[in-house]
Amino acid sequence: MTVVGVCVAGVSVGLFSLSGLGMDPFQILAHGIWRNTPVSFGTCYAVICAIMLVGIFFLNRGKIGLGTIINLFLVGYIADWSENFFGGIITGRDIVTRLLMLFAALAVMCLASAFYFSADLGVSTYDAVALTAAERTPVPFKVCRIVSDLFCVIVGGILCFVSDGSLASDGALFSTAGIGTIITAFFMGPAIAFFREKITDPLLR
């Protein structure tokens, strides 16, 4: 469940990117930080994940495992393959096609996330934040996820705006945030909770 869930989540990331309707909330934050540093995006992203990994190690090291390793080293390559693969098959780029890709990617991502969350053999450093908050507080996971996603969108959006100097310049903010970002921020947490309750937790039992 862990391997399949994380790898399929990587496939959905590629499809999500291909839709061109906005990045997921954590990517918004990562791009916002990167645009205000002199290093490459790959280096910046690795540093952000490393810092979060250290934090999770001390707060809830049980969330670090096989799923974490796959997320760190394989998901990026799987996402690249997915985007190239589907990009060669899906030639249409009209708004209807892009919306279909977005909703398909979101559904697949939420189901895949539910698989490796239920397996409990390690999750990505960002996923561990909401899971840890839900375990340590009376707040349900879906609410913790919405809060963490909104935090990433707001802070990342502000950082993109600061790097631009204005909303109308090179479009850093608009090139990263979109309808897909908003949909993901509000609905991914509840959708993952739904899939866990109805499909993946019963399957594991």
Image (spheres, grey):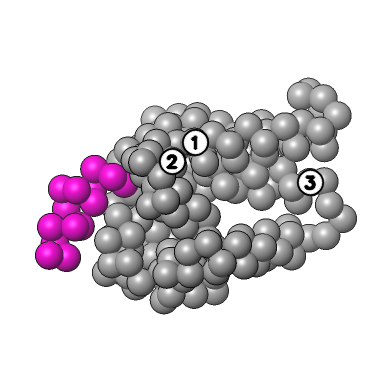
Amino acid type, callout 3? Arg
**Circles 3 and 1: CB distance less than 8 Å?**
no
- Name the secondary structure under disc 1: helix
Residue 201 covered by magenta stretch: yes
Magenta residues, as a range?
192-205
What amino acid is at disc 1?
Val
**Cα distance, mark 3 to mark 2?**
27 Å
- Considering the whole magenta stretch, tell me its main secondary structure: helix
Whichever of labels 3 and 1 marks the residue nearer the N terminus, that label is: 3
In the image, 184 versus 152, the foreground residue is 152
CA gap between label 2 and label 1 equals 5 Å
- Residue at the location (75% across, 37% down)? 159
Amino acid at pointer 2:
Cys
Looking at the image, do the residues carrying marks 2 and 1 touch, with CB atoms under 8 Å apart?
Answer: yes
Separation (CA) of disc 3 from disc 1: 23 Å
Residue pointed to by mark 3: 35
Residue 121: give x, y in percent of width and height: 35, 72
Camera-nearest residue between 2 and 63: 63
- Does the magenta portion include 79? no
Q: What element carries label 3?
A: loop
| Residue 20 visible in this rendered orientation of the protein | no
> Looking at the rendered structure, which numbered label has been put on residue 147?
1
Q: Residues within 10 Å of mark 2 (few under 14, many from 20)?
A: many
**Residue mark closest to the camera, 3 vs 2:** 2
Give the residue at mark 2.
144
Image position, residue 160 (x, y; %):
74, 37
Picture residue at 24% right of the left edge, 43% below the top: 194
Location of residue 115 (image quadrant): bottom left
Q: Which of marks 3 and 2 is nearer the N terminus?
A: 3
